[in-house]
Image (cartoon, rainbow, N blue to C red):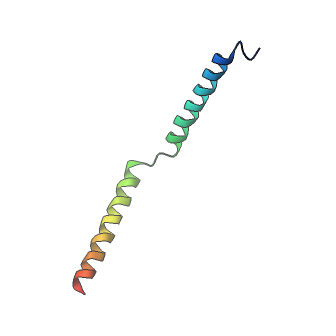
Amino acid sequence: MLAKYWKKIGLFILIVACIFNIMSKLIRKVSLNTELEASATYVNQTNQNNDKNLDE
């Protein structure tokens, strides 16, 4: 019986895996606002560290 339906079973498994992958990416998606705030904080910290190094 498995030999008769192996293509359909494989296609079903592939579709379920793709849906699971897409859903996990949508759930873990970071908002643009959060990403921009994190980038701005990083740039500010880097600039402050560079200014401190230049003053020494």
Q: Is residue 18 left or right of residue 42?
A: right
Q: Assign the C terminus to one quadrant of the image.
A: bottom left
Residue 1 in the image: state x and y as whole percent.
77, 14
Residue at the far front: name it: 3
Q: Quadrant of residue 43?
A: bottom left
Residue 13 in the image: state x and y as whole percent.
63, 26
Q: Is residue 45 left or right of residue 25?
A: left
Vertical placement of residue 47 versus 22, above or below: below
Depth order, front residue of 7/25: 7
Vertical placement of residue 3 versus 44, above or below: above
Vertical placement of residue 29 versus 39, above or below: above
Q: Residue at x 35, y 65 (%)?
A: 42
Q: Is residue 53 left or right of residue 16?
A: left
Depth order, front residue of 47/33: 47
Residue 15 in the image: state x and y as whole percent.
58, 26
Q: Quadrant of residue 5?
A: top right
Residue 38 in the image: state x and y as whole percent.
38, 60
Q: Is residue 6 left or right of residue 40?
A: right
Q: Residue at x 72, y 15 (%)?
A: 3
Q: Quadrant of residue 35?
A: bottom left
Q: Residue at x 55, y 31 (%)?
A: 18
Residue at the far bottom: name it: 56
Depth order, front residue of 12/32: 12
